[in-house]
Image: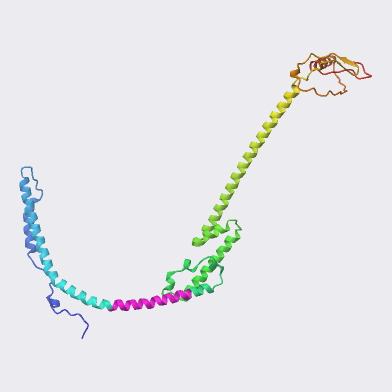
Amino acid sequence: MSMELKIISPTEDGFVKNIDFNHEELKAELERRLQKYQGLVYTEETVSEAKKDRASLNKFKKALNDKRLEIKRLCLAPYEDFESKVKELVGMVEQPVNEIDAQVKGFEEQKREMKRADIEDFWNLQESDVKTLVSLDRVFNPRWLNTTYSMKKVEEEIMEFFSKVESELALIEELETEFEDQVIRIYLQDFNVAKAMAENKALVDQKAKREELKRQREEAEAARKKAAEEEKAAAARQEEEAQQDAPEPTRVAASKVMGHEVQPAPPVLAEQVEQVEQIEQIDFRVWATPEQLGKLKNFLRENGIEYGRVPGQQAA
């Protein structure tokens, strides 16, 4: 029995090719009747006439559409019956097709799994150190499992990948950067050596900025300490100068120095004298005018300094 769908009825000549109706007659009549509505303006007094005209036109439009749908149903009725029966036949064929398709896909999946195992074996047999940093899953290309993708081509791409990564890792190591681990981690994200180099530069620049900021802070702190020490030293000098400018305690009793009697200075209150320092004797010469000598004597007397003639010399 032939497995061919044959249309028995209607025959090819019997299919409806045209649906004839009085199209031209209706069109001409409509053009004549609708002409009166061109530019027609209704007023508030004739609004009822406008409603009647609208209802009349809508009634005619509905009649046309109703007839269209009726003819469509008549034309589609035999097709819908035909479509339903053909779909039944298609469904009968689909069942074994699906079962066969499942088996074919099973065989194809088995071949894909075998090919993936071959790829994994090839990967593992390579002596590249890249394997310690990158797993096969990271770089696995699903296209490698296609039957049109030869195993030779897969192996070539894997070797090219190992060579590329080894070369670019060597470039990173040549930088001798203290940030090598961070730079390599950036590189391994997408194997972009330019991006890794940019990361290293950014890290180096950041460190330089931190060190410069630290140096500036240290210099500022050193300057602050120096200023504080200078201020403290200046204060100490001022205090020392003030103490040197203070008058020496006067002697209560007269004394003789080198045989010269010195009249006692005015008495000093006990509470003004905290400590009487040990008196030292110094012999020296001065070269001065009489006026200067007079001022020197006045200075010595005013400051309570005892003085006298050096033995063997005339008194000044």
- 176 or 34: which is nearer to us? 176
**Residue 288's spot in the image, x, y percent?**
85, 18
**Residue 218's spot in the image, x, y percent?**
63, 42
Task: Locate residue 172: give its quadrant.
Answer: bottom right
**Residue 216's spot in the image, x, y percent?**
61, 42
Task: Locate residue 258: give its quadrant.
Answer: top right
| Residue at 58%, 58% in the rendered image | 180
Task: Locate residue 168: give its quadrant.
Answer: bottom right
Q: Quadrant of the C terminus?
A: top right
- 135 or 44: which is nearer to us? 135
| Residue at 68%, 33% in the rendered image | 230
Colouring rule applied to residues? rainbow
**Residue 269's spot in the image, x, y percent?**
75, 16
Magenta highlight range: 96-119
Is residue 316 visible in the rendered image? The answer is: no
- 219 or 309: which is nearer to us? 309
In the image: residue 2, left or right of residue 35: right
In the image: residue 23, left or right of residue 271: left
Toward the front, the furthest residue is: 270
In the image: residue 284, left or right of residue 210: right
The answer to whether 2 is drawn above or below residue 285 in the figure is below
The answer to whether 280 is drawn above or below residue 219 in the figure is above
- 192 or 184: which is nearer to us? 184
| Residue at 71%, 29% in the rendered image | 236
